[in-house]
Image (spheres, grey):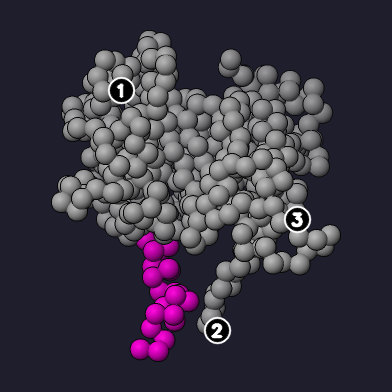
Amino acid sequence: MTTTAEDVLKMAKENEVKFVDFRFADTRGKEQHVTVPISQFGIDKFEAGHAFDGSSIAGWKGIEASDMLLMPDPNTANIDPFLEETTLFMQCNVIEPSDGKGYDRDPRSIATRAEAYLKSSGLGDAAYFGPEPEFFIFDGVRWKFDMSGCFIKIESEEASWSTDAEMEGGNFGHRPSVKGGYFPVPPTDSFQDMRGEISLILESLGIPVEVHHHEVGGAGQNEIGTKFSTLVQRADWTQNLKYVVWNVAHSYGKTATFMPKPIVGDNGSGMHVHQSVWKNGQNLFAGDGYSGLSEFALHYIGGIIKHARALNAITNPGTNSYKRLVPGFEAPVKLAYSARNRSASVRIPYVANPKGRRIEVRFPDPLANPYLCFSALLMAGLDGVQNKIHPGEAASKDLYHLPPEEDKLIPTVCSSLEQALEYLDKDREFLTRGGVFSNTMIDAYIELKQKEVERLNMTTHPVEFDMYYSL
């Protein structure tokens, strides 16, 4: 059901809203916001937008062209569940005032263009995405890095290293072992109530929750499974999910992170992304090929495998992402597809009803900007369909334990962000079709991410002392 601007004004009045919050995503995917009192909010905000300065957003325009407009999407209107004063919030597209079009570096505008490109290609009229972001909840975290040295310290009562900790009221002793979080009942799982609260708040925001559970990571790894939806809406929901997780954890006096690999030696957090393309109410991925897939779906997989290393720069956008994507562990590093084999980077989940036929891309992680991530996956898949790229034979063996001669025949995802950025630079044409991603946006993205690579490369690491201090 579509919400109109008039509906939002009515909603604001009925809820006695005091403030309206305009939210948008920066290049890295972090939500930013600006707030106006209700006295300054009217129908004009939906017609003319809200002016703001875009020059301070990392990876965006310089000071010479800083004036931008936030154009709120009435379909995203919700009452913020955390703020003291009643506040209505909406996700916005960032608009260039000069031509009234979506700013070429605005992630939500890119996602809007990706949906439009799908329709204009004639291949389909809707792409559905279902991400599964995992996250950790800690009691506290501290870090420091300067000329005198560096450290990180994670505090977690649930962690296996807390068995000897002296705690107020005593140490309860029930906690998961390393990689043992999947998924004993409370009190071993100490996050049941928190996940329940997160789930109820998500439902109140119109995001259907399908499941919630503790994840494999012993020190507070969790997952809230929410329903699939169309590309832009599902990216909006992912932003809201992160917002809710952070704030509920905060209200419990804890801290949540979507970092892919915050803990050494325990599971990392991935974001498996389920996807399918539909046309005229028909699922184009359903067919009579491998595992009930259509030729369309197989070619879509072919496009994702072909462009996987360029995709990594967007789906795995942090230096920390590649501490999860390590061969030999449970990470989906092998570029192959399979129905049951979770070691493959593309899995076809078993579903009884062909309407639910989809693929699950397993290498992305929750550090990814969801607008860019889903758009890039769609563009890669559509390139596979347009050019009939066949993904080869499905993987039937456990890809983690292949003989060396077979192992080297299967390509892998990138091993570092630096490598991924090089691949994105060389293999970008598929992203620029239909003006979805612009070359200037990709250049700015690579430049922004390259700075992260350089910052880490130039920082002395404690492990280096362990390896080299005495040599």
Q: Pointers 3 and 2 in contact (CB under 8 A)?
A: no
The type of residue carrying mark 2 is: Ser
Which comes sooner in the sequence, label 1 or label 3?
3
Quadrant hosting residue 300: top left
Q: Residue 298 at what x, y percent from top left? A: 25, 26
* Among the two numbered marks 1 and 2 on one chain, the one whose residue lies closer to the N terminus: 2
Q: At numbered mark 1, what does the secondary structure look like: helix, strand or loop?
A: helix
Name the residue at 48% across, 52% down: 268
Quadrant for the C terminus, please.
bottom left
Q: Which residue is mark 1?
A: 291
Hey, what amino acid is under mark 3? Phe
The circle on residue 255 is none
Residue 463 among magenta residues: yes
Tell me if residue 160 can be seen.
Answer: yes
Q: Is residue 314 above or below residue 19?
A: below
| 152 in relation to 216, above or below | below
Magenta region, residue range: 447-471
Q: Quadrant of the N terminus?
A: top right
Q: Residues within 10 Å of mark 2 (few under 14, many from 20)?
A: few
Q: Which residue is located at x 38 percent, y 15 percent?
A: 354
- Front residue of 346/165: it is 165
- The amino acid pointed to by label 1 is Ser
Between marks 1 and 2 in the image, the one whose residue lies nearer the viewer = 1
Q: Residue at x 39, y 48 (%)?
A: 331
Secondary element under disc 3, as helix, strand or loop, is loop
Instruction: Please give the name of the residue rendered at 58% of the width and 17% of the height, measured from the top-left corner.
Output: 2
The local crowd at label 3, few if under 14, some if 14 to 19, many if 20 or more residues have their Cα within 10 Å, is: few
Q: Which residue is mark 2?
A: 148
Residue 191: x %, y % from top left: 68, 44
- Name, please, the residue furthest toward the bottom: 470
Provide residue 194's location: percent of width, then percent of height: 71, 42
